[in-house]
Structures are given as structure tokens and as C-alpha cells.
Amino acid sequence: MGQASVSELEQQTVRRVYWRLIPILFVMMFFNYLDRINLGYAGLTMNKDLGLSPAIFGFAASIFFLGYMVLEVPSNLMLHWLGARIWLARILITWGLVATLTAFVWNPLSLYVMRFGLGVAEAGFMPGVVLYLTYWFPARYRARAVAGYIIAGSFSAVAGGPISTSIMTFLDGAGGLHGWQWMFIAEGVPTILLGLFTLYYLTDRPAMASWLTKEQAAWLEGELAAERAEIEQQGQHRLIECVLDIRVWLLAALFGCALVGIYGLLLWLPQIIKGMGDLSNIQVGSLSAIPPLLGVVGTIVVSRSSDKTGDRKFHLAAVYLLAAVAMLGSAYVASPVLAFVFLCIVGFSLNAGNPLFWSINASLLTGAAGAASIAMVNTLAQFGGLIGPWCIGLIKDSTGSFSWALVGIAGFLFVASAIAATMRVKPRETEFSGAIPSSVAH
């Protein structure tokens, strides 16, 4: 077979895989983010209805991440062993149920329980999807594949604001329920239905894909096997490898610092904007859509540049540095308009780092060790989600303003940028002492 026909086969195969998998993963990611961040919109009226202070609301937002951390690594190992079709469906159905039942919380404790339960139910989804893509996309296509679905998080924030605030406004009082209760129901039930559809639609591996030709499946399996062999050329990675590899710990610290900003902004943005002027909930929802909309643009532009140049770490450092500077600008300017402009720059740059991080994370190790390392990095990084939203609430309670909270977030983003610029992405050849030689492994 000539080089031209091989290239044509490659293009056709990757295109078919992309359009088969990325759209449904996009929809999954849309509801994943929506069911996480809609608490921020609910807080516009729920806080008053339930008597929640900023600190209580911040803790409720943060405790989600504690539940998420509990089952993150076990969940990703279950996906590796049982297959993506069954395990991702399980995740979707259970988190949809919990998200829907959050409509019926009545005090701070019940809200804590449901947010913790939502974290437990969602555990493993993000790293699980990243692991799943390593079964389908060669490394050179992976950043664009990740970007293709991960921008759904930004789309969720874009559409989530107007959708959530409209439901809260127009269904308030219907059936004796508050508008925020209807919002949780309307945005939780579709996730359950999506989980049931996943059981029918997803395919675990290329060799099992009836929608690929034999030649396409054989080419894809061969490419992925060659990549695994290159990584494993000095040995098979054991599970302990992910604990001993310093890159895993550095990447977790990097993303944890970034998550302080990502989730702090996502969950508090509606209330930050509300504090900028006399705005209705629908106006707040519409303005809240602009920063994540720019995040979609940033994700596409930066991921394409990263794939074109082959660089991940310096692109990642640059976007976090820009986000940190813009966050400081938003904290210090007196004009609400300028403060919002800086928040828009934060939205553009902060979200653009996500596909770069996940591409690096997916390339560290292989096999069960790879699955564990992806989940371990994401688990350790959730300290950002734990401390970000809660600390913003505590600072708001103490100072009556969000300004010092934004300064704190900027500090974490500066640290993330520094780690990204200085960390080593590829392993040293001498760092395989813990690996099992291939000749022994087989």
C-alpha cells in the first residue's frame, strides 16, 4: 500500500472516529458541567430561601469535590476493567439522579449531603473520558479530540446562565416549587436519559466497532499499539509507577492551582456579576455567558496552536499567566465595566488550558498504571475545587467584597503557570527502574 493511500486511510479513520465519539462526549460534558455549576445560579435565590450565608454556600459548593476525590481512582480502574460503555453509563445515570434530587433540599445539611453525593456519583467521569480517548486517538490527534468535547464545559456555562435563570424566573411558583427547584429537575433528568442512551451507543475498543471498516480498525489498532510499545520500550508500567513518578505529583499541583480559579469563577461568577450593579437574574445569566463563550474561542485557538507546534507545557504556562494577570486587573480596577472585561480575558485564557492539561496527563504512563495516573492526578488536583469556592465565600463574609478573593485566585494561577513552564513532561530514560522488563512481562 502506498504512502498516499495510507495517508488517506488515516484521515478517513480519524475523521470517522471523531464524528462518532466526540459529539456524544460533548453532550455528556455539557451536562457534567451544567449539573456542577448550576448551583451558582440557584444561589441567586436559593440562598435567601434556605438562609445560606456566603460561607455556607461556598462550603456546599466545595464539598462536591471531597465526594469526587473519594472514588476517583477506583472509578477509573473500573472503567479500564469493565469498559467505557457500562461504566460511563453508570456514572451518568447516578449523577443525574442525585442532581435531580437536589431540588428537594431544605437546609444546609441536606444541601451538603446532596453535593457530596453528586461528587461521589460523578467521580471518574473526566479522567475516564480522557482514558477512553487513548483507546481511539493516536497522540498526535489527542489534543484536538480532547478540545472537541471539553469545550462543552464552556458551552455549558454559556448556555447554562440564560437557561438556568430563565427556568428560575418563569417557573417560579409552578406546582408549589421555587424556580431553583425546577432548574435542578429540568437539568438533571436529561443526564439520566443520556446514560441510558450511552449503553446503546458507545463502543469500547476499535476492534469491536462495527462502524469502522476492517482496514480502518486494523490501522487504528496498529497505531495505538505502536504508541504503547514506544512508551513501554523499557518495561511494562506497574500501578506503583503512578505514585513514584514525580511528574504525576507536579501535574496534580499544577491543575489543583488552576482549579482554584476555574471552579471559584464558575460557581461564584453569577453572584460576582450581580454585585456589579442593579441587575435582574436573567441579565446576570446573560452576562455570565460571555466569559465562557470566549473560553470556547480560546480552547480552539490554543489547542490548534499546541497541536501544530507539538508544544504543550509552554502553551499551558502562557494561558495561566494571562489569566492570573487579568484576575488581578479585575480585582483592582474601580470601574465595573473594566472589571467585567478583565473577567472575560480570564474566561478566554483559563479554559484554554484544559485540553493541554488532559493531553499531558494522558501521555504519562500506559495500561492500568496509565488509568490510575490519570485518575490520581485529577483526584489530587481536586484540592483546588475544595478550597476555591469555600475560601471565596469566607473572604466575602469577612470583607464584604470579592476583590481579595480574586487576588488570592490570581496567586494560585501564577503558581500553576510556573509549574507548567518548568516541569518535565517526558520521562528520563533512567526512570524505568520500577518497570517490569518486557521480556519478563510476556
Image (cartoon, rainbow, N blue to C red):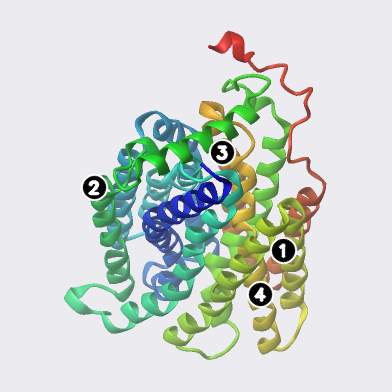
Which residue position is annotated with label 3?
Answer: 374
Which mark sits nearer the N-terminus, 2 or 4? Answer: 2
Which mark sits nearer the N-terminus, 1 or 3? Answer: 1
On residue 401, the disc is 4
On screen, residue 418 versus residue 233, left or right, reads right
Does residue 394 show up?
A: no
C-beta proximity under 8 Å, tags 2 and 4: no
Q: Helix or strand or loop: what does disc 1 sit on?
A: helix
On residue 200, the disc is 2
Residue farthest along the bottom direction in this orientation: 278
Residue farthest along the front direction in this orientation: 2
From the viewer's perspective, is the residue at label 4 or at label 3 nearer?
Answer: 3
Which residue position is annotated with label 1?
Answer: 319
Residue 394: percent from left, percent from top: 61, 61
Residue 42: percent from left, percent from top: 40, 70
Closer to the camera, 175 or 411?
411
On screen, residue 15 versus residue 372, left or right, reads left
From this view, report whether residue 30 is shown above or below residue 89.
below
Dot 4, how many residues are within 10 Å of its Cα: few (below 14), some (14-19), or many (20+)?
some
CA gap, disc 2 to disc 3? 26 Å
Residue 50 figure quarter: bottom left
From the viewer's perspective, is the residue at label 2 or at label 3 nearer?
Answer: 2
On screen, residue 206 versus residue 374, left or right, reads left
**Which amino acid lies under the numbered mark 4 shown in the image of this protein?**
Ser
Q: Helix or strand or loop: what does disc 2 sit on?
A: helix
Does residue 243 show up?
A: yes
